[in-house]
Amino acid sequence: MAGYDDLILEALTRVKEIMPWDLSRLIKSGNKPLLLDVREPSEFATLRIPGSINVPRGILEQSCEWDYDETEPSLASGRDQEIVVICRSGKRSVLATDMLLRMGFENVVSLKTGVRGWNDFEQPLEDAAGRLLDPDHVDELLMPKLRADQRKPRI
């Protein structure tokens, strides 16, 4: 049986990743790709890379197609556009990128290390109101929040 990390490793045989400095360079060059954040809406509202759009991974496939309540026109209208998929740490984005490739998107990559790495590289993050966030405060927002019952039992 494959676990979560096994699924990611398998997807990485097909998915290309870029580092935060690659994305920063790409944006500064004027060649702005579609920044697709696949985190949950509450995560996206808390902080995001400026200019990104939010399509949670759970509705990604429907968002890429016309005639669904979840249709995202910027995705449904062009499978040839340049897309960088973003999540918190770079794992969900790998799985989402793999799905986009399977759906015929050709120019799609995953942001390795996600918004955590973007913040570590001291690149701008904003809140839902568009206010830039202090990178030190962002570290707190990005910390895992595991409850005791979510941790692997010790035997």
Image (spheres, grey):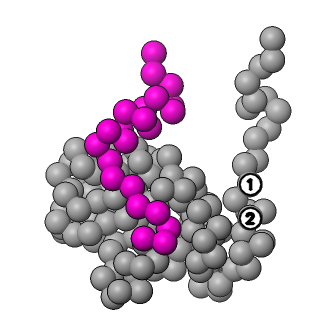
**How many C-alpha atoms fall within 10 Å of the one at disc 2: few (<14), some, or many (≥20)?**
few
118 sits left or right of 1 in the view: right
Image quadrant assignment for residue 34: bottom left
Residue 123 horizontal/vertical position (percent)? 58, 77
Image quadrant assignment for residue 64: bottom left
The residue positioned 51% from the left and 31% from the top of the image is: 4
Q: Is residue 51 visible?
A: yes
Decide: marks 1, 2 in contact (CB < 8 A)?
yes
Residue 28 horizontal/vertical position (percent)? 41, 86
Residue 1 horizontal/vertical position (percent)? 45, 15
Q: Amino acid at mark 1?
A: Met
The residue positioned 79% from the left and 38% from the top of the image is: 147
Q: Amino acid at mark 2?
A: Asp
Given residues 110 and 54, the one toward you in this image is 110
Residue 115's tag is none
Residue 143's tag is 1
Q: Is residue 56 visible?
A: no
- Seen in the picture, residue 21 relative to 71 is either above or below; the reply is below
152 sits left or right of 42 in the view: right
- Examine the structure image and report whether residue 10 is included in the region drawn in magenta: yes
| Element assignment for label 1 | loop
Q: For mark 2, what is the residue?
A: 139
Task: Read off the magenta span.
Answer: 1-22
- Seen in the picture, residue 136 relative to 154 is either above or below; the reply is below
- Examine the structure image and report whether residue 130 is included in the region drawn in magenta: no
The residue positioned 78% from the left and 62% from the top of the image is: 140
**How many C-alpha atoms fall within 10 Å of the one at disc 1: few (<14), some, or many (≥20)?**
few
- Seen in the picture, residue 2 relative to 117 is either above or below; the reply is above
| Element assignment for label 2 | helix
